[in-house]
Image (cartoon, rainbow, N blue to C red):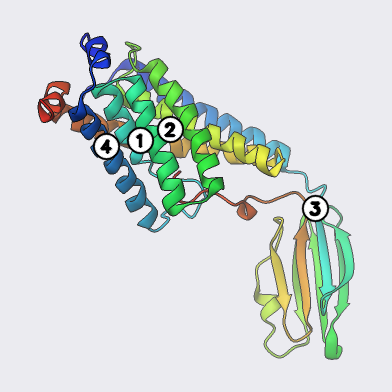
Amino acid sequence: MERKRGDLILIAATALAALVWFLGGRLLSGDVNGKYLQVSVDGALYAVYPLAEDRSFDVEGVSGHHLSVSIVSGSADVTDADCPDRLCVYQKRIENTGESIVCLPGRIILEITGPESLENLDYDGISW
Amino acid sequence: MTESHGEERRSFRPGKTAVLGLLLGVALILGYIEALLPPFTGIPGVKLGLANIVTLLTLKLYGRKEALMVLISRILLSGLLFGSLYSILYSLAGGLFAFFLIAFFLHYPKFSLIGVSVLGAIGHNMGQLIVAMLTVKTLKLVYYGPVLLISGLLTGILTGMLAALILKHLRAEDADRLYK
């Protein structure tokens, strides 16, 4: 098949541009400023904490359920819960906008809010 | 573009219209088949772009005007059939951006069809990225660029190779013979 020198240069240049773009984006997006952990209980806003500050706190849900939540270096996690199955403790740490941890028995929702995440976009799925 | 191009323009040739319609049909089907494939990357916007093969073929077989006609018809039709107004908007942005890059570099001696196709795929993805950023009014999507660059690179190489393979077996004379 016909292949030319310009093709290789173009391919190399694109790969390089992508790498530089990626690394540049990494450096810039490292900051967690603008992201918040939003805690709601039974549909009502309970508390909002900036993700940039490390902290630990307790959340009291409905029917006396308690969760222990910690924010460490830009991500939030449930460290302890007093419900029997402790599913929320086993869920992975959340750090990106839109990610959430849900405790059903206590009706507690922990959610990251802030700058838009890519997943929320209405992308064209058909005639791309 | 071939020497006979001016001559073609003067007289209406139903056969050519038929072949262009055929190409449009192929482009629509390719786009549809692609939509049926499971999203193999899980990243929104990363697609093979098989319909781009038809754009490359039409450009090589006929010319810019014909290829642009097939492209716009394809986008409008597939948008109306399978998509929404938004998908038409996204596709037009990407498609036209890609088309002008491809059409401009088609006869640039340092690129083969693969290079031209890569340019088109990258142009397409960047065009859609820009429209997406304008639509949701955020610059945060810039972080999505590298993914689109790399995916454009890979799919561009693939579609360029496929188009070159097809062209090897189908020359302009053969296409002409279809309607002579």
Left or right: where B60 falls relative to A20: left
**Residue A76 in sight:** yes
Tell me the mark number nearer the camera, choosing from 3 and 1: 1
* Label 4, residues with CA under 10 Å away: few <14, some 14-19, many ≥20: some
Q: Nearer the viewer, mark 4 or mark 1?
A: 4
Residues A105 and A91: in front is: A105
Amino acid under disc 4 = Gly
Q: Which mark is residue A35?
A: 3
CB atoms at circles 3 and 2 under 8 Å apart?
A: no
Q: Position of residue A38 (x, y in %)?
A: 82, 64
Between the residue at mark 4 and the residue at mark 1, the CA separation in whole angstroms equals: 16 Å
- Mark 2 or mark 4, whichever is nearer to me: 4
Separation of marks 1 and 2 at Cα, in angstroms: 8 Å
Mark 1 Cα shell of 10 Å, populated few (<14), some (14-19), many (≥20): many
Is B3 or B156 nearer to us in this picture? B3
Letter of the chain that mark 4 sits on in the rendering? B
Q: Is residue B164 above or below residue B79?
A: above
Whether tag 2 and tag 4 are in contact, CB under 8 A, the answer is no
* Numbered label attached to residue B52: 1
